[in-house]
Structures are given as structure tokens and as C-alpha cells.
Image (spheres, rainbow, N blue to C red):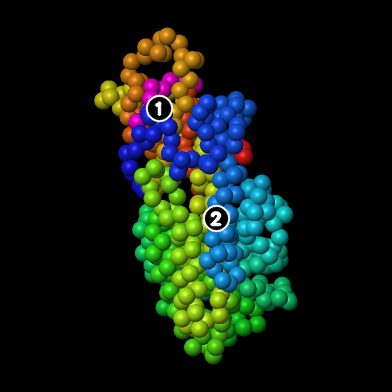
Amino acid sequence: MMSHAALSDAIEGSISKSVAPSTFQQTPEPSVGGVALEELAKTYATPLYILDKATIRQQATSYLETLKTAYPGEAVVLYAAKANLNLALAKFVNDLGLAIDVVSSGELYTALQAGVSADWIYMNGNNKSDAELEMALDAGICRLMVDNEEELAQIDAIVRGRGLKEKPAVLLRVAPGIEAHTHDYLKTGTDSNKFGMPINRIPEIVGVCLTRYAETIDLAGLHAHIGSQIFDALPYQDLARIMLKTYGDLRERFNGLILRDLDLGGGLGICYQTSDDPPSIEEAIAQLARTVAETAQSIDYPLPRLLLEPGRSLVATAGITLYTVGTVKKTESGRVFVAVDGGMGDNIRPALYQADYSALAIVKSSQKTPEQQAEPGVQSARVTLVGKYCESGDVLLRDWQAPRLVAGDRVVIFGTGAYNYAMASTYNRIGRPAMVW
Ligand code: PLP
């Protein structure tokens, strides 16, 4: 998915359905959810994040329905809030039947403020502070995913210190040693990254939970997340087998111990480019669910409650960002820079891990002066779409085959519903864009 020179879509004047929100229409004028983008730009200004509820509903339903059909046990879909969270979104996905996976006190606070009940909240994170753990334990959230042994000691101290009556249910995050083919920064399941505990140490750590922390910690299961923007269903099936083998080994070693939860994380990829080819939710999740059920059956293990934590595949395609073109510049070497009114502050992903996007230009030829129409150097060309931030790396698209653009034209970037708003900064003291449904 990374670093394609792409986007012939824009010059052909159409965008592939696979990268756009399901209600996106290009004619008679570009719109989402029946609302013209131009009207949104005029009402809310640009840059603007636009989210399509229908797409999120559709993706959530795919997860829920697939699990209902393919998994004979209980299954819970946790929305990985890190992908994109605000009050409205937290409430919306929870109303759709998704639990919420948070990774900080800020996300936890947002979910609680949105009215999500604590038993629908789960907490991940590799370096939770005492204050974050206290907040989670005081709220009585459903599960804590414990990343390391120090965190077990932290939880134990808080439970004792606060005299909590109920033992918090925890899942131990495992680094299962699975190599998922994605960008290095998006890989999380191997021992070369910071998350989780090596799988070969899990028996020892489970032993510690069952003895030293027997009075303060309720060990509910194991958790693993192998990475993000994954295009292959097989690593998930490998993961399910590895985890269930560990469950079987732990049962043998610890006197019939049964772990009731199994969390296999998120990470399913989406189409940023027409050429991207991730498995569908139905395909990947059905195969995964069947693998869990069959493997559990093969070792005569009670079906665990299956937890999944998708983020990107629920919300990325639902989102677009709408920009307005400002400066258009042609350098002596012939490179054309088209600058829009946002950039790395609202979308850091191209700079952070060379993420590539599809885009569409909305050329408003009616507003062009005859001089602009005749302007040299900005005819249809491969352009570099840049932002307005004081960094040379503030590039949104490289080698974008764009039509002739002048100030006032609009640019739509697709697939920005995940890890854009959530990663937005106020660098240069430029405010973050608004977000509308
Ligand atoms: N769960 C955990 C523990 C994660 O770290 C992440 C993302 O990094 C996710 C779930 C969600 O991943 P994605 O948005 O790729 O589905």
C-alpha cells in the first residue's frame, strides 16, 4: 500500500467506490450523505473532516453479523478508539453494539462522558500511569489489557491501596512473534516492538498472577494485536492457533485453568488506493472465527469469549478531508507544488509512514479569471500536494496526476476517517479542522 505513484482517478474525473464513503456521489456534484461538499465547505470552512455515518454503520454491521454467523460462542467487537474518537462517535458506535477500547485517560474520559457504560469499556496501553489505572478501576471498566509485569504490580497496589472489593479482570498482552506484512511502525506482534510480553514468558507470568496476585487480579485471558493495515487473513488464523495452543498448555500446566476471554486485536486493512486489495471483513473475520472455534474444539477447550478490536476498518473509509487550494507554484525544474489550507497538522500519516491516499480535485472553472485560465505551468500535471505547515515534509500526496488547479479549487482526500483527526496537532498554532457527520 505504501508509496505508489497513483491517483489516475482524479484526472479521469472519477474515484473508485472502494476508497470512498458508501454514500459518496460524484455527480451532479460531489456529495456525502446527500450533502454537497461545496455546501459543507461554505458552511464549516476548510479544511474539514467529513464522516459518513452510513459507512461506519455498514462496517460495524459486517463485523457483528459475520461473528454472529461464523462464531458459535460469544463475541464482542471493540471499537479501537485511537482511530478516531469524540463524544458523538463514541455514542454512535456504542449504540451500534460495539464496545470501546481506550488507551488513555483522555479516551476513557470521552467514552464515559459520551454515556458509554463502564462494562462496555476496555483499556489497552503499554505505559499506563497510576492515575490512568486508578481512573479505570474506579470507573469499574470491563477489562484491563495488561502490557507488562510492572503493570500487574501497579494494579495490585491500587486494588489493595483503595481496598477495592472486586478483583479487576485482566488480559495479558502477548507478543506472539507473528510477522504481519505492513509498515514497520504498524507492526506490533513481534518482539522487536514495544508492546506486550514474549509468548514464551507467558506461563511464568500467568503463574505469578495465580499466586502473588491471586487476591487482587482476575486473569480473564490473553490479548494479541499483530499490526495494522494488514492485507492477509492468514496471519490472523496463525495467531488464533498460537494463542489457543498457549491456552491448552496453560490448562495443562495450571491444573485445568480455563481462560474465558481471547482477544485477537484489530488491524484489518482498507483500500487507500484502488489497487489495494484487503480481504473483506466478512471473509477475514469468518475465517478467523472458524479457526478459533475449530482449534478450540480440537483441543476440547470451552469456546472463549472472542474479542476483536478493529479501528481503521470501521471508520477510515467513512472519512474524507476537504481542502481548498491556495498557492500553485512551478519550480524551475518543472515540479508543480499545489498548496492546500491544511496538511501535516490534520494528516500526519504521509510524513509519519509514507501513507498514500486517493484524491479528487474539484475544479471550479467558473470562478477562474481569463488570466488564470491562461496561466502557464499549472496545466494537468503530476503535482506534489503540500500543506501550509513550516516543514518541507508537509506533503499530502506525491506525484498526484491532477487536473489544472488554481486558488479556490477544492481537493478531497479519501480514507481519512482513521488516524487523521486522532493524530491531529496544532503545530504552527493552526487549529484542528472541524469534523461533521
Ligand atoms: N488494538 C490495539 C492494541 C492496537 O494497537 C490497535 C492499533 O494500533 C488496534 C487495536 C486497532 O488497529 P486498526 O485500527 O488497524 O484496526
**What span is colored magenta in the figure?**
401-408
Q: Is residue 204 visible?
A: no
Of helix, strand and loop, which mostly describes the magenta segment? loop
Circle 2 residue: 62
Asked if residue 170 is positioned above or below residue 430 in the image, the reply reads below
The label on residue 375 is none
Q: In the image, is 296 to the left or to the right of 74?
A: left
Q: Please tell me how crowded label 1 is: few (under 14), some (14-19), or many (20+) other residues with Cα within 10 Å.
A: many
Residue bearing the label numbered 1: 338
Query: Can you say whether 155 is above or below 388 in the image?
Result: below
User: What residue is at 39 percent from the left and 59 percent from the top?
Assistant: 232
Percent from the top left, x then y, of residue 146? 55, 70
- Give the foreground label among 2 and 1: 2
User: Which class describes the residues within 10 Å of circle 2: few (<14), some (14-19), or many (20+)?
Assistant: some
Q: Nearer the viewer, residue 36 or 247?
A: 36
Amino acid of disc 1: Val
| Structural distance between the alpha carbons of marks 2 and 1 | 38 Å
Q: What element does badge 2 sit on?
A: helix
